[in-house]
Amino acid sequence: MQRKIVAFFLLLILSSFSIAQEKTFIREYTHKVGDADSKITSRAIALNQVKKILLEEVGVYLESTFEIEKTETSEEYKELTNSQITSITAGITETKILGEKWNGIEYYIKAEIIIDVNDMLNKLNKIAKDRDKTKQLIEANAKAEQAYKALSKIEEKLKETISEKEKLKLQLEYSVNSNVLSASDWYQKGYNAEELREYDNAILYYQKSIDIESNYIVAYNNMGNVYSKKGNTDKAIKIYQKVIEIDPNNVSAYSNIGAVYAAKGNYDKAIDRYQKAILLDPNNDILYYFLGLSFYYRGDLDKAIVSYLKSIEINHDSPDSYNNIGVIYRDKDNYNEALKYYKKAIQSEPTYSQAYYNIGELLMSTENIDNIKKAAEYFKKAARLGHKDSQKLLEEFFGESW
């Protein structure tokens, strides 16, 4: 019977909708051209603002839908603010331009967002449970918001100054900040394309973001992720190393390189990169988890346990770490410790199906008739939670459906 060590976080994605529900949002915005504006900057501002209006409306609608439908959502989602929900929504929706007009005085733009409600609720719940993705989207949105506020301040300064030298300097600052808006828009398009697994488009959009703003680190990191998903790990590593050149303290880049090396089976290099990331972010439980995973696959079981325990010390709600410690003790034939940590995984996350399965497997291995009966109950619990191996085992070995 095969035991499985859990390499990724279990995602509980629940929705009360049984059929697709489409909702269309349409809004328009007119930007009044300022002294520093060109057609390009005016469009960047108008697009940024119409998207902001649309995304805020989508976010409010989705939040109210969760409440009205009484959908069970993740705790991480419930803790998000309206602004954070809007930031996440920006990365999982497509804004379609319905019309735009420029006359040198105003830039008018009309746009729409169409969402599949069920799909959006699922994606929001999923991303809210992924701290790295949530952080990326929030930071990208915050960066664009700061740039927009800076544009307003620069516009006011331009009205007050009479120095041509100062005006030139302010106009340059204005152009730089408007570029941030455009880069952010391309980044969000890239993120959405990546979510849709349109990887070639995602790379194209991330590259356009970088072309506009050469130090757009999050776009580099995400483009590296896409190349990794496409199987081009050498290209991915080069991109992550470019991030480190720009920002030697970028935790994500070291972690991402570690993940690539782990996927290639080069656990020595993976461990080295995770350890470098931990030096920069010593309170990141996820880094310790993946360090433990790399130690496990390299065969350093004791070091793996130490890493998992450190992950648990930082974040007590770590079902994956508890479970994986249980797997290690099972490998060491220490059944009592294995059982203890499997149960801790379930205490941490009652719907953690893999731990129920692992307890069933552990009880089966004792060849005790009473334990085998108990094992069936654990397999049934795992099966009811959607664990495929448990469902198959119940049907084939016990001769009953779950």
Image (cartoon, rainbow, N blue to C red):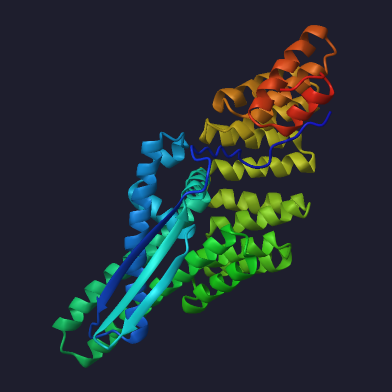
Tell me if 354 is positioned left or right of 170 in this view: right
Q: Quadrant of residue 394?
A: top right
Q: Residue at 62% across / 40% down in the picture?
A: 289
Q: Residue at 63% across / 33% down in the picture?
A: 321
In the image, residue 358 sits, relative to residue 366, either above or below, namely below
Res 247 seen here: no
In the image, residue 254 sits, relative to residue 28, either above or below, namely above
Q: Nearer the viewer, residue 39 or 206?
A: 39
Query: How many marks are shown on the rendered structure?
Result: 0
Residue 212 picture location, percent across and down: 47, 78
Q: Nearer the viewer, residue 276 or 99?
A: 99
Tell me if 328 is positioned left or right of 33 in this view: right
Tell me if 308 is positioned left or right of 250 in this view: right
Q: Nearer the viewer, residue 363 or 82?
A: 82
Q: Residue at 49% across / 57% down in the picture?
A: 92
Res 333 seen here: yes
Q: Quadrant of the C terminus?
A: top right
Residue 17 picture location, percent across and down: 49, 40
Q: Quadrant of the N terminus?
A: top right
Q: Quadrant of residue 392?
A: top right
